[in-house]
Image: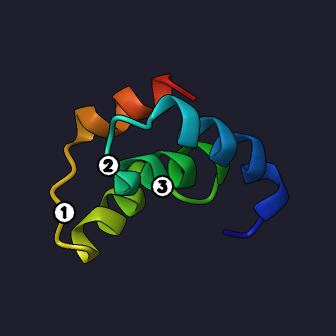
């Protein structure tokens, strides 16, 4: 991420609010929400690289929790 400091509050909140969701989903949400230069498709690719299916609606739900 280009701006790690900007992501810190999101990371902390994601670990708390998304504790029932896969860590990958929380990470994708953090990347999508905290870094303006990463779009939704890039965040979804994070999941694809780990062979974890992540639906568009899952990412949006996780972002609502941040």
Horizontal side, residue 14 vs residue 42: left or right: right
Q: Position of residue 32 (x, y in %)?
A: 52, 49
User: Around disc 3, counting alpha carbons within 10 Å, would you say few (fewer than 14), some (14 to 19), or many (20 or more)?
Assistant: many
Residue 45: x percent and y percent? Answer: 31, 66
Residue 2 marker: none
Residue that carries the numbered disc 1 in the rendered image: 52
Q: Is residue 48 left or right of residue 35?
A: left
SS state under label 2: loop
How has the structure been colored for display? rainbow
| Residue found farthest to the bottom | 49
Looking at the rendered structure, the secondary structure element under dot 1 is: loop
Q: Please identify the quarter of the rendering in which residue 51 is found.
A: bottom left
Q: CA distance from mark 3 to mark 2?
A: 9 Å
Q: Are marks 1 and 3 in contact (CB under 8 Å)?
A: no
**Is the residue under label 2 in contact with that under label 1 (CB below 8 Å)?**
yes
Kindly identify the residue that appears in the image at 15 percent across and 56 percent down: 53
The residue identified by callout 2 is: 22
Question: How far apart, in angstroms, are the residues tagged by discs 1 and 3?
Answer: 12 Å
Image location of residue 55, percent across then percent down: 19, 44
Please give the residue where the numbered disc 3 appears in the rendered image: 27
The crowd level at tag 2 (other Cα within 10 Å; few <14, some 14-19, many 20+) is: few
Q: Position of residue 66 (x, y in %)?
A: 58, 29
Give the secondary structure at mark 3: helix
Q: Residue furthest right?
A: 5
The crowding category of the residue bearing disc 1, from other C-alpha atoms within 10 Å (few below 14, some 14 to 19, many at least 20), is: some
Going by the image, does 32 lie left or right of 61? Answer: right
Determine which quarter of the picture holds residue 44.
bottom left
Q: Is residue 64 above or below residue 50?
A: above
Mark before the other along the chain sequence, 1 or 2: 2
């Amino acid at each position: 991420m280009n701006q790690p400091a900007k992501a810190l509050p999101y990371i902390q909140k994601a670990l708390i609010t998304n504790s029932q969701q896969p860590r990958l989903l929380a990470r994708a949400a953090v990347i999508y929400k905290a870094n303006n230069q990463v779009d939704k498709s890039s965040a979804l690719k994070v999941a694809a690289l780990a062979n974890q299916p992540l639906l568009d609606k899952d990412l949006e739900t996780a972002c609502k929790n941040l």
